[in-house]
Amino acid sequence: MNYKSFYSWEKFGDKKKLIKVINTIIRVNEIKFNDLINLLKGLNLGSNRTVQRMVIFYYYMDFIDICEGNVKYKGNLSDTYNLNDKIFYRFCEQYFKYNPIELVIFLSENTECQTILGRNIPLRYSNFRDFAISFEKLKFNIETNSYSLLTHDFTCFIKKKRNLASLERSLDRKRELGLMGEEFILNFEKKRLNRTEGIVRISDDDVSAGYDIKSYNNHSDIYHNRYIEVKTYTENDKVYLSRNEIHVSKLLKDNYFLYLVDVDLINTPGYSPIIIKNMHKNLFDNDLVKSKIELVSYEVSDLNKLILE
């Protein structure tokens, strides 16, 4: 079996039928291939070829083994409560592993995009389109004449393809949101402390400081003792921290605060940001919070020593 043939399938199966197939496989655990096909045919799932393909589908999803005429469930779907999502995301992982979806088919030019461009989904993705619709992850909106992804966890499958102009627009938007968040926190701190003097935004003057705002823990404090890094976020519930910010937070410990500002709530009366004291301890030493390294850069020096052919 090879993945090229899997990609070329015109259809991968209907959700209801696929769920019946995997539930049957889970129940019997291990069975001869032909016996399983006969068992499934009794469930009115379609022709013999259709049933076989749905079984092979789960082989490609790595949920079952097919060896020497036997089908064996791998036991990696122990929690069947959210079976619909597990099957869909495993499908995406396998389908786009060697066939990454291109960003150009999306209306939005940022990594949080949710809407596919009109009816213009490339033909090579039509089998994915039909599968996603069946699993209720994709819906066509008649009013906007476009498909909408009904999920927020799809961007990891997108091959990002940007030109310079779109990148600059994205960076400008991030800067705009960052300044909006910092301005909000400046006013928030003035209200919290009931004082206006001494609360300083330094991000404009010193980008290497590792924080954005110098403030105080209490109204009566004379010296700065609260160093605030401001991060804005949206519904994706995710922020990015630089190596320097992490390093400074480790040094300043309880004097370093991360303020998380939800841009969708920033104009709501009485809204307060999420405040995390001692960011390094409460984020990076906390098993409940996920973090990963996404970008690494290298310094290359002594170029004059290169010997070029």
Image (cartoon, grey):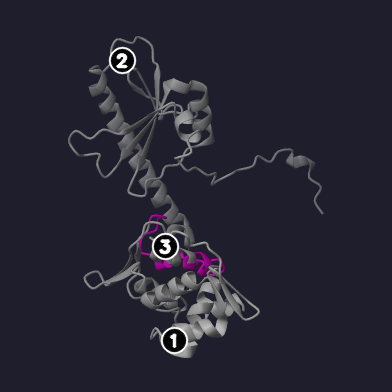
Q: Is residue 179 left or right of residue 87?
A: left
Q: CA distance from mark 1 to mark 3?
A: 23 Å
Which residue in the protein does label 3 denote?
80
Relative to 105, does residue 48 appear above or below in the rendering?
below
Neighbour tally class for label 3: few under 14, some 14-19, many 20 plus, Cα within 10 Å: few
Residue 234 painted magenta: no
Residue type pointed to by label 2: Asn
| Front residue of this view, candidates 92 and 179 | 92
Residue 279: give x, y in percent of width and height. 44, 30
Image: 225 above or below 301: above
Residue 70 or residue 106, whichever sits in front: 70
Amino acid bearing label 1: Lys
Element type at marker 1?
helix
Q: At numbered mark 3, what does the secondary structure look like: helix, strand or loop?
A: loop
Q: Can you give x and y, in whole percent of width and height, for residue 269 in the image?
A: 17, 36
Circle 1 packing at 10 Å, graded few (<14), some (14-19), many (20+), is some
- Residue numbers of the magenta segment: 91-112
